[in-house]
Image (cartoon, helix red, strand yellow):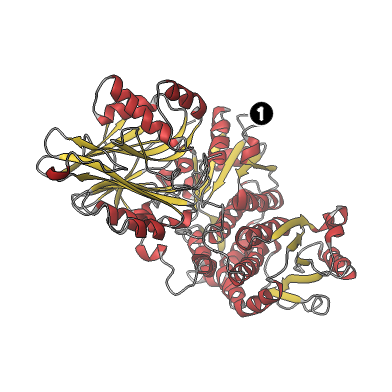
Amino acid sequence: RQRTPLSRSIGKLHRRAMCGIVAYLGPSTAKDVMLAGLARLEYRGYDSAGVACVEAVPPAAASANGPPSVKRRSSSGPSHTIGVVKAAGKVSVLASRSSSSLNTGTVGIAHTRWATHGAPTDANAHPHTSSDGGLAIVHNGIVENFVALREELQRKGYRMASETDTELIAHLISDVRKQKWMPLEEAVRQALSQVQGAYGICVISSEEPDLLVGARKGSPLLLGIGEDEYLLASDASAVIERTRRVTYLNDGEMVVVARTPSGACTYEIKTLENIKLCREVEELQLKLEDIQKGSFKHFMLKEICEQPEVLENAMRGRVTNRHSAGSHESGSGCNDVLLGGLSEHWPALAAAPRIIVVACGTSHHAGLIGEYLLENLARMPCEVEYASEFRYRNPILCREDVLIAISQSGETADTLAALQLARAAGCLCLGICNTVGSSIARETDGGVYLHAGPEIGVASTKAFSAQLVALTLIALKLGKERETLSPEELSANLGAMLALPDQLRCVLEQKGTVYEMAKVFKYASNFLFLGRGYHYPVALEGALKLKEISYIHAEGYPAAEMKHGPIALIDQFMPVVIIAPTSDPNYRKLVSNIEEVRARGGSVIAITEEDNHELDAQCEYVMRVPSTADFLMPLLCVAPLQLMAYYIADMRQCNVDQPRNLAKSVTVE
């Protein structure tokens, strides 16, 4: 099957990964450029940070010792040293600690770390150096043969200064050069041939002070091309203040950035087999204001409030109207779905025996709603799997199956591995993601770009809504292709979708009501979220948002399952959120669930339509949404739950945008 990657059919944006890398070579002070870049990467989640720069040593000091650095003499000039400053905690701590040092170097590497091997300490923070201090490295990913490499290096006499797997790569490169001196580029290439696992690395050496080497396998890395300066980064947000021109490395590639004796800077991209490549330079569509909070207190609140525009962007150009120009407003005459990244694949999708959706976290909840959409609207068999389970359970796949991988970042390790498993079985593989140029976008046959814009808050909000729009459009198009929806039904459903942005604006106008409710429940220790049908995954998502950012234990359940265990937990201290729109076919059963909670002293928070007042006397609080079709109701009901989680977390003085122990994109297992 000929592959038409999602990245070819949609525009370019930035990547996201778990740890953060910034490296620089140019005329400016490297430390200042890199600290600014690290500050842009703080949203990703991290527990320590560090920076290393190559600096010239004054002749009078050439023989002096100055840990944590070591002097080397380049072939063309004075001695150089690598200075390293690291700090557990925030980038601001690192900036303060490095304020009086590293002020002359114009080549450097920097990193924000999310701990995998070893606790978040100064010693375990990146960059890591070789034993003699002449080489420094930063690394995203995991070295899978960590134990074997460590034992071998220890047998050779190397001593480990940290608990990390990254330090091993520094020693490996140094060991290669010790056996036979070679340029840094070649030493990196040979050392990486011994490494199993995922990596995005940047390396500097005091012996080659005008050189910066980067390499990628399974962890994102891009090159920012400025005015006679270059930056390597794991995310475009780290380079946007310096340049909009970037090129992306693919797996198995490396980039060598060098400063010539005349002072000019150049770069070269090669494979790890040393084959030179010619790579397209792309213009970032990302704007600086997109990654700034503006007047909002937190990115999460900004992103919740951006959702009406996100829905508009996710539908723009994808709902065709072949009749009157004004029919979009009324909903009449909207009779088809256009998804360019799937245009070649509708026959295979419509004929598939089943669709398998793989995802993790919030994307998995979107996939669960997608299952209801595909089965109800298109009568298409669908299974939704946790990617982390799917990849390891030897699933039964046939070539006619279609796999849809959902990931905001496009770099989620388990989702990517599940996708590769399905590709190996010959399945048609499609992607739904927000980050074009990402690994999932590159490895799929086609797919849908979310148009959600950068999502900085670790807890996903607007990307979830955009994923639901994409899945709904796919289900409606398949309903047309499989003739399970009449033209009139399709037109009416698309018209209802086009009304959603304004309806969601009405929901968000109730922020004050949700804020007052949050005051009452901010000290709760547990929450229960209940829903049926389309709203069971919404309940799961509401519980996830609350536990992610407020650290309150919360569980989501199908409402009918309450009697099978969770009801034992309900007392006067247990708030219960029930999603109960009258459009739900099981609405009367949900009313019975509310009565059961009240009978046990529980507090009930309900979500229902604006014109439904039946629940007013039975619930402590009622959050209201406009009426719409039942399959679109999740896009309205999730917003009050996001706001509730946000306000409770803020009142509890939690770090809303950077919750403890969490990262924006999980690129390791």
The residue sitting at 24% across, 24% down in the picture is 182
Q: Residues within 10 Å of mark 1 (few under 14, many from 20)?
A: few
Q: Residue at x 34, y 25 (%)?
A: 175
Front-lying residue, 465 or 665? 665
Name the residue rendered at 83%, 80% in the picture. 617
Q: Is residue 52 left or right of residue 370?
A: left
Of 181 and 59, which appears nearest the observer?
A: 59
Residue pictured at 45% horizontal, 59% vertical: 453
**Residue pushed farthest right?**
599
Q: Residue flagged by tag 1: what amino acid is it?
A: Asn
Q: Quadrant of the C terminus?
A: top right
In the image, 174 versus 527, the foreground residue is 174
In the image: residue 7, left or right of residue 358: left
Question: Can you say whether 532 is above or below 62 in the image?
Answer: below
Residue 252 percent across, percent down from the top left? 38, 31
Q: Which residue is mark 1?
A: 394
- Residue 259 visible to the viewer: no
Q: SS for tag 1?
A: loop
Kindly tell me whether residue 568 is visible in this rendering.
Answer: yes
- Residue 120: percent from left, percent from top: 50, 48
In this image, 612 relative to 393: left or right?
A: right
Q: Position of residue 302 (x, y in %)?
A: 50, 69
Look at the picture and state if 542 lies above or below 499.
Answer: above
Looking at the picture, does residue 398 appear above or below residue 529? above
Coordinates of residue 349 in the picture (x, y in percent): 59, 41
